[in-house]
Image (spheres, rainbow, N blue to C red):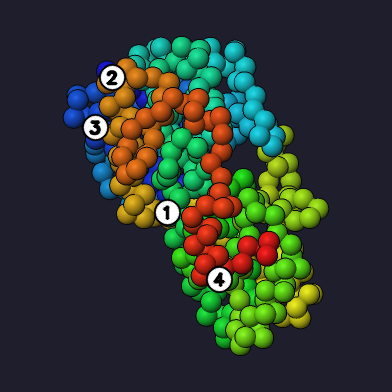
Amino acid sequence: MRIGILNSGGDCPGLNAVIHGVVGAASEKGWEVIGFRDGFEGLLPPGDFKFLTRADTSGILKLGGTILGTTNKGNFAAKIGAGDVAKVPQEIVDRAKKTLDQLEIGALIVVGGDGSLTTGHQLFQDGWPIIGVPKTIDNDLEATAMTFGFDSAVTSVVDGLDRLHTTASSHKRVMVLEVMGRHAGWIALWGGMAGGANVVLIPEIDFDIQKVAEFIRLREAQGHHSSLIVVAEGAKLPDGLVARENEHGGEVRLGGVGAVVANQIQEMTGKETRACTLGHLQRGGAPTALDRILGLRFGVMAVKLASEGNFGRMVSYQSYHVDSVPIIDAVQKIRCVDPTGEVVDAARAIGICFGDC
């Protein structure tokens, strides 16, 4: 067996752990592994790829990013707007399939988020031997309880809040930290809880900035002269999302809600308020131990699915166990925070404000 692997979409910590797991498990079976550079684009003739051996993956577990490169643009982009998808043109699919056939690839492991897996599902329907591995720091794929990269992103948020807490306390300021989370607020919620935030604003819970201001004033009256606010980039203001631009005809790039919240809080409370945006710091750096182990396990399971001929499936993590589900189950619905769920209830119980009460 000769198998291929590619990373597609945004980068995140743990991608190299998946590659390490795939190469290690395949080598144990005597299989060859070919890594395609820059996502699906590496499949286009004449092909941009390299054979991967144990020597190539030695020492990459601790590295962020991916040794294969990745892209969320190009000929295989699946997302064209807010939740909209587009099929990859058949001419592009046919050209890429020639590379797959010439290299005699028996299974192609696609490591990506909902957009990349949507493309992968289309290729599977076209007869490709596709196996999906879920990758997103947002942790918003319905068919898996956790994706690698999420824990590393949350850890970077907690580190940022730890640092902001000291400067906020010293100057008696309100500090607003904007984090990633287009449709789902998992990073903001988990990061905010672990980092001691006082206010968490997420896409799933509509908030009233007046109520956030009232909460800050109440804290001031109780002797708490500094406050930390975490806001997901997809949190909705009364007049909608705060967007930067529509990039290359794809989904609108979000960003800037943190600055808007900070300005309004300062105006309403009179408290000096500053905003910070973590941005791509959440995607970079070394993966946490959890993300390294999860990535490794995902890579090993992908090879197991290839050995069984179970194509059109995605590796999935449920109840501490790694298994698989049909790819279509992973791309049909985004997993959002339940506003009435146990995690939000726990946050409210310790006094975190979501701006809705």
Q: Earlier in the sequence, mark 1 or mark 3?
A: 3
Mark 3 Cα within 10 Å, few/some/many (few <14, many 20+)? many
Question: Mark 4 against mark 3, which lies toward the viewer?
Answer: 4
Helix, strand or loop under label 1:
helix
Residue corresponding to mark 1: 151
Mark 1 Cα within 10 Å, few/some/many (few <14, many 20+)? many
Query: What whole-number distance in Å separates the C-alpha atoms at marks 2 and 3?
Result: 14 Å
Looking at the image, which residue is at 59% across and 52% down? 339
Residue corresponding to mark 3: 25
Q: As shown in the figure, which amino acid type bears the numbered disc 4?
A: Gly
Quadrant location of the C terminus? bottom right
Is 331 left or right of 3, judged from the image as shown? right
Labelled disc at residue 351: 4
Residue corresponding to mark 2: 308
Q: As shown in the figure, which amino acid type bears the numbered disc 3?
A: Ala
Question: Mark 4 against mark 1, which lies toward the viewer?
Answer: 4
